């Protein structure tokens, strides 16, 4: 099993190019062996705690399935069922979880909660989505790109829409792997400046291009990959109306926009999607969409990550 320099994953920032490539290669092997018994006992006796403050379909299901298929066990902890919801500190909760479990996946509102958990847990902590980052999703996205395009360097990825958690880690991940990125994001919805600076720095090191533009058409021209996400992330529901008017219809990925990409461009979305908002049904259900490979790959990259952190 490959080893990682950090025993936690709070963001793609925590991984270097080689570690990302190794995690993906190992995930491809998990995928190839999905019907064999090769890895059935990789995590026997290990317990993964899943602490969720927000809803999830793919993240919870894929981690629970991964642990089951690797011979381990999971415990799902809804925030509201924990003493944390009655005021126990994150520090004491982290210490307690570390006494029983071997690894923790946490999905939280504030990224500070992930940082605090990682500081105080004696076991590896994996970010299962915070307001700032979604590293497990980006590992699956990069794996999906490699499966369909067979390389990273020289490709151009267009991000269309909100500069949110998925966008932040995707920009960082693409910069680390040497992809060119053009992100069409309305003014006021860009990623934090610190993240943009980091992406610019990484892109310079890898001699790739990174650009924020306002017009979606400028981002997708000759792109190999088009990616979007919801305009209203979990926790942003009170901004619903303001966001809808900032994003719709200009930032919607529809067939007209996809006509400006390369002919073999792929469409990606982390899901859940709001059809008719950030993407039209003909695009997400169309021949260039790889969203279901992307969702399946969550399982394989998470297996790869779990064995790397736990063995
Ligand atoms: N893409 C993703 O993280 O999906 P869930 O919110 O369903 O876990
Ligand atoms: N940006 C979305 C991603 C969901 C997987 C959200 O935070 O709700």
Image (cartoon, rainbow, N blue to C red):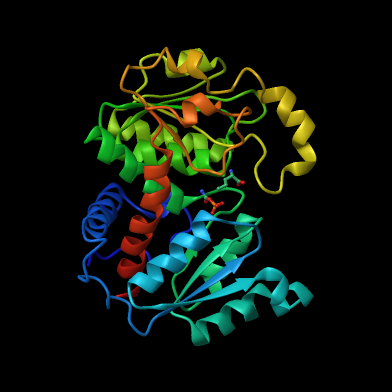
Observer able to see residue 127? no
Q: Residue at x 32, y 72 (%)?
A: 70
In the picture shown, does residue 240 fall above or below 253?
below
Quarter in which the C terminus is drawn = bottom left
The residue located at (57%, 28%) in the rendering is: 161
Q: Is residue 208 above or below residue 234?
A: above
Q: Is residue 110 above or below residue 169?
A: below
Percent x, y of residue 53: 66, 62
Between residue 108 and residue 34, name the one nearer to us: 34
- Is residue 282 or residue 6 the one in the foreground? 282
- Which of the 4 quarters of the picture holds residue 9? bottom left
Up-down: is 96 above or below 290? below
- Residue 311 vs residue 11, the one in the foreground: 311
User: In the displayed structure, does residue 130 sit left or right of residue 226?
Assistant: right
Position of the N terminus by quadrant: bottom left
Residue 288 spot, x, y in % from top left:
37, 27
Percent coordinates x, y for residue 25 in the rendering? 22, 52
Look at 47% across and 79% down and name the residue there: 122
């Amino acid at each position: 099993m490959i080893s990682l320099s950090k025993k936690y994953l709070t963001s793609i920032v925590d991984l270097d190019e080689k570690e990302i490539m190794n995690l993906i290669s190992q995930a491809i092997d998990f995928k190839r062996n999905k019907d064999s018994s090769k890895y059935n006992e990789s995590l026997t006796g290990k317990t993964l705690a899943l602490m969720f403050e927000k809803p999830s379909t793919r993240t919870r299901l894929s981690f629970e399935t991964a642990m089951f298929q690797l011979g381990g066990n999971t415990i799902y902890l809804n925030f509201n069922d924990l003493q944390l919801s009655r005021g126990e500190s994150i520090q004491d909760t982290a210490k307690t979880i570390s006494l029983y479990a071997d690894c923790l996946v946490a999905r939280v509102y504030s990224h500070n909660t992930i940082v605090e958990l990682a500081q105080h847990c004696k076991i590896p902590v994996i970010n299962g989505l915070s307001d700032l980052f979604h590293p497990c999703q980006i590992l699956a996205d990069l794996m999906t790109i490699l499966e369909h395009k067979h390389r990273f360097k020289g490709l151009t990825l267009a991000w269309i829409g909100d500069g949110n958690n998925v966008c932040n880690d995707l920009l960082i991940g693409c910069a680390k792997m040497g992809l060119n990125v053009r992100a069409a994001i309305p003014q006021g919805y860009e990623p934090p400046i610190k993240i943009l600076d980091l992406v610019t720095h990484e892109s310079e090191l890898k001699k790739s291009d990174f650009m924020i533009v306002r017009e979606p058409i400028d981002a997708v021209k000759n792109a190999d990959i088009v990616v979007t996400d919801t305009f209203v992330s979990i926790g942003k529901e009170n901004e619903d109306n303001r966001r809808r008017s900032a994003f719709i219809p200009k930032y919607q990925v529809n067939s007209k926009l996809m006509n400006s990409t390369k002919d073999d461009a792929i469409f990606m979305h982390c899901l859940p999607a709001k059809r008719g908002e950030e993407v039209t049904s003909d695009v997400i259900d169309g021949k260039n969409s790889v969203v279901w490979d992307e969702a399946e790959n969550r399982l394989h990259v998470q297996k790869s990550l779990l064995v790397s952190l736990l063995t």
